[in-house]
Image: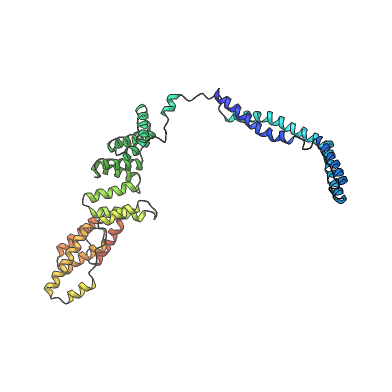
Amino acid sequence: MTLWFLFALMTAAAIFAVLWPLGRAGRPHLSGSETLVYRDQLAEVDRDLATGLIAAPEAEAARTEIGRRLLAAADSQRDPATASNTGLRRLAAVAALLGLPIVAIAIYLPLGSPRLGDFPLAQRARAPDVNQPFDNLVAQVERHLEQHPTDGRGWTVLAPALARLGRYDDAVRAYRNSITYGGESSERRADLGEAIAAAAGGVVTSEAKAEFERAVALDADQAKANYFLGLAAQQDGHLAEAASIWRTMLAKAPADAPWRPLVQAALDRAGATKAPAPSAEQVAAANDMNKTDRNAMIRGMVDRLASRLKQNGDDVEGWLRLVKAYMVLGDRDKAMGALTDARQAVAGDTERLRQLNEGLKNLGLDG
């Protein structure tokens, strides 16, 4: 009832706003009393002329101006258009008075909801308020899911919120339910693996790794899953494998991928740089040494190269230099061992494996 009363007041205000200027426009600008004023002004001019207050030319000019105004006032009173304009204004006022409510009702009935009842107070109390604290909103979603435990969309919304609050164990359960009731996807599997790793203090456990592998099986380019698989390899001490995963990610990623700096930093920490070649100063110093010292220097450089390649096995050129160095030194067993290690290091990268095999053929080693 109160709502309809407010609507009535609003309608009345709108009608008044339309009728007010029409009512003001309907008033005559000139009345019959104006002619009497102008006649009095003419008599006053005659009196001033008789007493000598004004000269004859000035009196004549004043009579002319007053006479013009008097004629205009008389014409406006006799103007037939005035009555016609008044009639039009009255017609417009009536149209506004009746037309506005009719038009409003005609628009509201098909587009509005006149039969919609009040929203129950209990439901209004349950409606989310974006101005509430974040944990209160999470609690509301949790209460909803207690009553509707198969709401996959609700679990999907709740899981990242729980992770944001640091409730990782609850987030793991929520992600599992989102997969159960909302369907499997690479994103949900990757998010589940991340929550499991977070619950373990940042360690990529075997359970978390299994989820990342499932995510990659669904989408080979799933960035989060690939990053954590590289992290799992790094935590297991397989730096070459970690570097290979992250290099592949960077090679495939667009230049504006938001996670590129993170992966690049991880790659740098893994020591993913090519083993440096001997400098010109080192080569010159070796030429000045006797054979024994030179061999000792070369073996030291070879050992350092081998040590670097254990940390970064993706450097195909480094492996080829190491194998060749062992052959030059006459250590064929070490050369064959380095060959085996090289193939194991690049086994997951078809292109690097092809480059390694071609280089070995050039060295006369086919297997």
Residue 318 visible in rendering:
yes
Residue 181 visible in rendering:
no
Colour setup of the view: rainbow
- Residue most extreme to the top: 1
| Position of residue 92 in the picture relative to residue 228 (left or right) | right
Above or below 292: residue 5: above
Q: Quadrant of residue 6?
A: top right
Residue 346 position, x and y percent, is 26, 56
Q: How many marks?
A: 0
Q: Quadrant of residue 197?
A: top left
| Image quarter hosting the C terminus | bottom left
Above or below 354: residue 26: above
Above or below 333: residue 19: above
- Residue most extreme to the left: 292
**Which one is nearer the viewer's eye here, 95 or 223?**
95
Residue at 27% in and 63% down: 358
- Residue most extreme to the bottom: 288
| Position of residue 322 in the picture relative to residue 23 (left or right) | left
**Which one is nearer the viewer's eye here, 85 or 307?**
85
| Position of residue 130 in the picture relative to residue 297 (left or right) | right
Q: Quadrant of residue 203?
A: top left
Residue 34 position, x and y percent, is 81, 37
Residue at 87% in and 44% down: 46
Residue 128 position, x and y percent, is 41, 32
**Which one is nearer the viewer's eye here, 295 or 329?**
295
| Image quarter hosting the N terminus | top right
Residue 76 position, x and y percent, is 82, 38
Residue at 80% in and 34% down: 83
